Amino acid sequence: MNDAQKNFRALADKYYDEILKTASDMLKIPSVSGNEKDMAEYTFRKMRELGYDDVRFDRVGNVIGLMKGSGGGKSLMYNCHLDTVEPGDQKKWKYGPFSGAIEEGKLWGRGASDTKATFAIQLYTPYILKKENLLPRGDSLVVGVVCEETSAFGSMNMAADGLLTDFAIVGEATENDIAVASRGRIVVEVKATGKSCHASIPHTGVNPFDFFAKFLPLLPEYEPASDELFGKSTMTPTKIVSSEEGTNLVPGSVTLTLDYRSVPSETNEAILQKIQKLADRCSTEGIRVELSILMVDVTCYNGYQGRGLQGEPSYAIPRDHLLVRTAKKALEELYGREVRTKPWAFATDCGHFSQRGVAVMGFSPAEIRLCHTTEDCMDLAMLREGIAGYLAIADRVSNIEK
């Protein structure tokens, strides 16, 4: 069967109601980061119901479903996160954050745009292709990851465990265009340790603020990396904390927090080295300076505990990469319009996989402007278009020879 005979719009129409119901059901399940248990179990049951060849939970609580291909094609991961941010003031929602309401041509609820409605499409994509005798050559791996909103802990551990594919599609909002890059974020802590004493006799101690009196004026001299998609990386002081609560003490230590937004050409190690060079210029007798990347304690819904990065690694894939070119061509033939390749302004899970050799892009019918707002919703016309888009991409990409 050639491409002309595969009417993905008709298939999107055929399965639209079922996918919409699944998305609505997901939105009725609260799943704030760390509390994804009900959402994870729903996903597990749905994958079983759809006939996935293997469905399991990994050690941190990610849900992983495998639909085997006919053989010889590139493997493809579909990735969305099970968790959401808090709903905020529920009185500000036109329809309840956990209503899953279908009103005014939209699907409403916390996570509709980030990323539950897209995840419903991803769940159904391999199932539809198999059921409609369009089973691709490559294996399909559909994953719902945990704690993305707080630390990207699910994807970080999945990548570290080596569960990798040739290609991956991350379902963060792209308005049915293709995302090819995202900024990274790390939080750097600069800790200066001196010697505490009573403020009335400051000469008997060593004040860590003496280091920062030199260090802070040097920050504008930091030379940020530059990228054609994002411009320059940014480094912003956001917090300073003393080891002492009282106001009449020279502190034993002072910690400055730097929020760093990286471009894809930078590594975290290179960033730390450049900040260290600034710190070395501010050497102060009696003061020890330590730099570290902030990690956060994470407790998953299944009880697993670990440490996650406060941020995400940056990522980029060339616009002429085989994955992007193939997906773009499939979408443009389907939609009859130009499909843009564009960067995300925010951080995503993509870097955890791209750093380990997976070719990653983003695709979703969701609108970025609605994420994390009390207007969180999914336009139903865009949802329908996104279903067809996922089918078209999967059909092309998963049939690329291994």
Image (cartoon, helix red, strand yellow):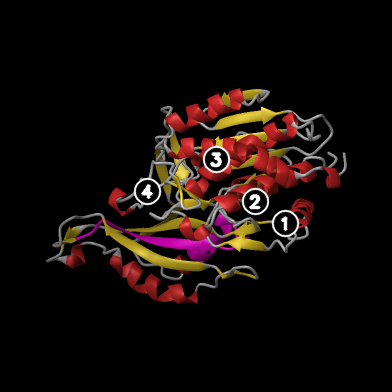
Residue underneath mark 1: 335
Residue 267 on the magenta segment: yes
**With respect to residue 76, does 272 lie above or below?**
below
Alpha-carbon span between mark 3 and mark 1: 21 Å
Residue 270 shows in the view? yes
Residue type for callout 2: Glu
Residue type for callout 4: Tyr
Residue 177 location (% of width, % of height): 65, 58
Residue underneath mark 3: 20
Q: Secondary structure at mark 2?
A: helix
Along the polypeptide, which appears first: circle 4 or circle 2? 4
Q: Residue at x 56, y 55 (%)?
A: 269
**With respect to residue 222, does 130 lie above or below?**
above
Along the polypeptide, which appears first: circle 3 or circle 1? 3
Along the polypeptide, which appears first: circle 3 or circle 2? 3
Along the polypeptide, which appears first: circle 1 or circle 2? 1
Q: Secondary structure at mark 1?
A: helix
